[in-house]
Image (tube, rainbow, N blue to C red):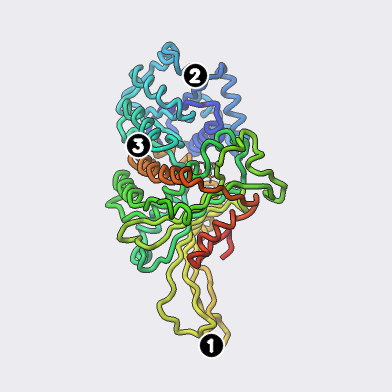
């Protein structure tokens, strides 16, 4: 059972709360892990009665929690712990209504609202003495749009909360397959010895989405794929893949090691920005078999902006372990399929004892995040029943769904539980956010300065030709979907 908590959910009627957070909390209710005394206080600007809000919550669970109808008993408990509070952030009178601050109780302030409101909320929480040593604040990405704005947000958060009370969510760190990277690397001896430039040729981190901007054109056009995905999700994955073994699984040890990776990333210069970065946006094409419009025809998109919906980068890490090993990062919207994978490509065998025609393929370790979670190690084997040595590449394939029931926790649920339990290991520390923005700012500045062209790629493809060239030039190729 979780410790008793009060969760104060700012943005209680918004998309994140209704689509992700309420279903995540409700699942905990169905497994009876929420203490009867715990409360969920949903805060919004709309003038709603308690009954109106309960109807909103119920509708969202019917839509987003498949087994809702079979959990009527849990619903009657859950609805009794939910309350709704209307709040005008500027109004001190409204804030005074939050009068119950119990020092003993864990109080989680979850800001599921735009970051431009973080400053006002953290100030009001402080001014109205609502912060206790047992309080925690949860903030969503984006933390700023560059290093300076991120530092500004961090400063406001720190004025009321200590760093260990601030939980900056990157929902990729809540994904089971991403957390499994720590287990794979640090609970198995077989990988660590070869986890470096001595055995690895290069690593690919590819997060492809099949959807377009889905009505978020206005937000997305000011953001782009580099800020929306690379600054957070892809760099966090890169850190877990590249970091040194932490002293322990404690939050500070893990985050210290991730920070070292971010500080070792090679900056781009006028030459490498041209050769080692690709930015592009989708044009017309097919999405799941249906005709799809181009990015510039999406609502809210300004045709003058050169906003990228796709980025590919060749990234180098300047440290002892990874010197000379490129990390190719790629992410894009409206690509052929939603597939997130990490591919570790090992070096060639030093000497081929088999016939020239029959050379061994380089080994690859594929860590699958989406659509299924698993680990696939491709090995060369001898084709049986054939005279001589015909080598054949076969997979040692571990699919986690074969071993665990599906329907286990989703990433928001896992991260919410960590907040309530007070475990910040899988949240992003202030210095990590600022170090990652510093590296991203360098790319954005150079793209602007060099007026880097924006390529186009057909909706439903694996990205622009230049993205393939980025690897082809190095005699390498992307692993696309389940292909080789
Ligand atoms: C979000 C981005 O952080 O991650 C979205 O803002 C993106 O643009 C989403 O679609 C992808 O998350 P997932 O878990 O669906 O891969």
Q: Secondary structure at mark 1?
A: loop
Q: CA distance from mark 1 to mark 2?
A: 76 Å
Q: Which quadrant is home to the C terminus?
A: bottom right
Which element type, helix, strand or loop, lies under badge 3? loop
Percent from the top left, x then y, of residue 96?
40, 13
Label 2 sits on residue: 85
Quarter of the image for the N terminus: give it: top left
Crowd around label 3: few <14 · some 14–19 · many ≥20 (10 Å): some
Give the quarter of the image for residue 468: bottom right
Residue 422: mark in rendering? 3
Q: Where residue 164 appears, x then y in whole percent? A: 31, 35
Question: Cβ of disc 1 within 8 Å of ligand 1?
Answer: no
Instruction: Name the residue carrying label 1.
Output: 388
Q: CA distance from mark 3 to mark 2?
A: 25 Å
Query: Which residue is the extreme one toward the top?
Result: 93
Measure the alpha-carbon separation of dots 1 and 3. 60 Å
Residue 41 as seen in the image, left or right of residue 336: left
Give the residue at x 58% y 19%: 51
Q: Is residue 302 above or below residue 244?
A: above
Q: Are marks 3 and 2 in contact (CB under 8 Å)?
A: no
Q: Position of residue 457 (x, y in %)?
A: 62, 51
Judge left or right: residue 142 versus residue 484.
left
Residue at the bottom extreme, as displayed? 387
- 10 Å crowding of disc 1: few (<14), some (14-19), many (20+): few
Residue drawn at 52 percent across, 44 percent down: 225
């Amino acid at each position: 059972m979780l410790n008793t908590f009060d969760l104060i959910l700012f943005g209680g009627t918004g998309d994140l709360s209704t689509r992700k957070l309420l279903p995540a909390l409700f699942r905990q209710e169905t497994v009876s892990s929420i203490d009867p005394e715990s409360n969920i206080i949903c805060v919004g600007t709309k003038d709603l009665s308690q009954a109106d809000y309960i109807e909103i919550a119920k509708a969202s669970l019917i839509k987003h929690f498949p087994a809702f109808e079979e959990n009527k008993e849990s619903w009657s408990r859950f609805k009794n712990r939910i309350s709704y509070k209307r709040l005008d952030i500027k109004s001190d009178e409204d804030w005074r209504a939050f009068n119950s601050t119990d020092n003993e109780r864990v109080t989680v302030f979850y800001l599921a609202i735009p970051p431009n409101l973080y400053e006002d909320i953290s100030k009001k929480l402080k001014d109205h003495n609502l912060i206790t040593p047992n309080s925690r604040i949860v903030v969503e990405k984006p933390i700023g749009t560059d290093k300076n704005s991120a530092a500004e947000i961090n400063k406001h958060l720190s004025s009321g909360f200590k760093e260990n009370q601030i939980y900056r969510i990157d929902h990729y760190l809540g994904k089971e397959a991403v957390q499994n990277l720590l287990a794979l690397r640090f609970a198995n001896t077989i990988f660590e010895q070869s986890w470096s430039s001595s055995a690895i040729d290069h690593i690919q981190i590819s997060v492809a989405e099949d959807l377009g901007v889905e009505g978020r054109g206005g937000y997305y056009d000011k953001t782009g794929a580099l800020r929306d995905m690379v600054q957070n999700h892809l760099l966090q994955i890169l850190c877990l893949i590249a970091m040194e073994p932490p002293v322990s699984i404690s939050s500070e040890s893990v985050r210290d090691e991730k920070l070292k990776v971010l500080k070792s990333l090679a900056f781009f210069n006028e030459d490498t920005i041209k050769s080692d970065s690709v930015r592009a946006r989708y044009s017309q094409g097919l999405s799941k078999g249906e005709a799809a419009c181009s990015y510039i025809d999406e609502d809210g998109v300004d045709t003058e902006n050169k906003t990228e919906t796709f980025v590919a980068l060749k990234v180098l890490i300047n440290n002892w372990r990874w010197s000379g090993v490129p990390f190719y990062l790629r992410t894009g919207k409206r690509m052929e399929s939603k597939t997130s994978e990490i591919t570790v490509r090992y070096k060639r065998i030093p000497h081929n004892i088999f016939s020239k025609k029959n050379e061994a393929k380089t080994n690859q370790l594929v860590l699958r995040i989406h659509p299924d979670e698993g680990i696939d190690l491709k090995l060369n084997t001898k084709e049986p029943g054939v005279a001589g040595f015909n080598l054949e590449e076969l997979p040692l394939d571990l699919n986690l769904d074969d071993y665990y029931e599906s329907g286990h926790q989703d990433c928001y649920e896992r991260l919410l539980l960590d907040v309530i339990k007070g475990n910040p290991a899988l949240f992003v520390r202030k210095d990590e956010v600022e170090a990652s923005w510093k590296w991203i700012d360098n790319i954005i500045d150079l793209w602007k300065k060099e007026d880097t062209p924006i390529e186009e790629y057909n909706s439903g493809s694996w990205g622009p030709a230049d993205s393939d060239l980025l690897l082809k030039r190095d005699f390498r190729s992307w692993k696309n979907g389940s292909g080789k």
